[in-house]
Image (cartoon, helix red, strand yellow):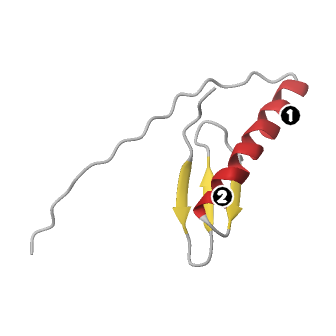
């Protein structure tokens, strides 16, 4: 499965979360570390859901960029 991950830069770290898996978050000192940790977190999250008999939600979120121009 391929889930969309959102990465946000904070003042001293990077956070990552998965919109399709509420509560599935990770924090790292670098973007690469946050991505590595969220991959592990996704696997653990899905394994826990499966073990609990919960239905695993299919990936559904999408991402795009919107360009805007600010007037000077």
Please give the name of the residue rendered at 67% of the width and 60% of the height, measured from the top-left corner: 33
- Near mark 2 (Cα within 10 A), the count class, few <14, some 14-19 or many ≥20, is many
Query: Left or right: where does residue 36 sit relative to residue 7?
Result: right
Residue indicated by mark 2:
34
Please give the name of the residue rendered at 60% of the width and 36% of the height, measured from the top-left corner: 20
In x, y percent, where is residue 7? 54, 55
- Rendering quarter of residue 63: top left
What's the mark number on residue 10?
A: none
Q: Are marks 2 and 1 in contact (CB under 8 Å)?
A: no
Please give the name of the residue rendered at 90% of the width and 26% of the height, measured from the top-left corner: 51
In the foreground, 44 or 30: 30
Query: Left or right: where does residue 33 sit relative to residue 3?
Result: right
- Near mark 1 (Cα within 10 A), the count class, few <14, some 14-19 or many ≥20, is few
In x, y percent, where is residue 16? 61, 54
2 or 1: mark nearer the eye = 2
22 w.r.t. 33: above or below: above
Residue indicated by mark 1:
48
Farthest residue, direction front: 32
Query: Left or right: where does residue 47 sit relative to residue 10?
Result: right
Query: Where, quadrant-wise, is the N terminus in this rendering?
Result: top right
Query: Left or right: where does residue 41 sit relative to residue 12?
Result: right
């Amino acid at each position: 499965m391929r889930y969309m991950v959102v990465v946000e830069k904070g003042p001293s770290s990077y956070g990552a979360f998965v919109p399709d898996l509420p509560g599935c978050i990770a924090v790292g000192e670098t973007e690469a570390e946050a991505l590595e940790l969220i991959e592990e977190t996704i696997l653990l999250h899905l394994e826990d859901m499966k073990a609990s008999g919960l239905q695993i939600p299919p990936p559904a979120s999408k991402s795009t960029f919107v360009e805007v121009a600010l007037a000077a």
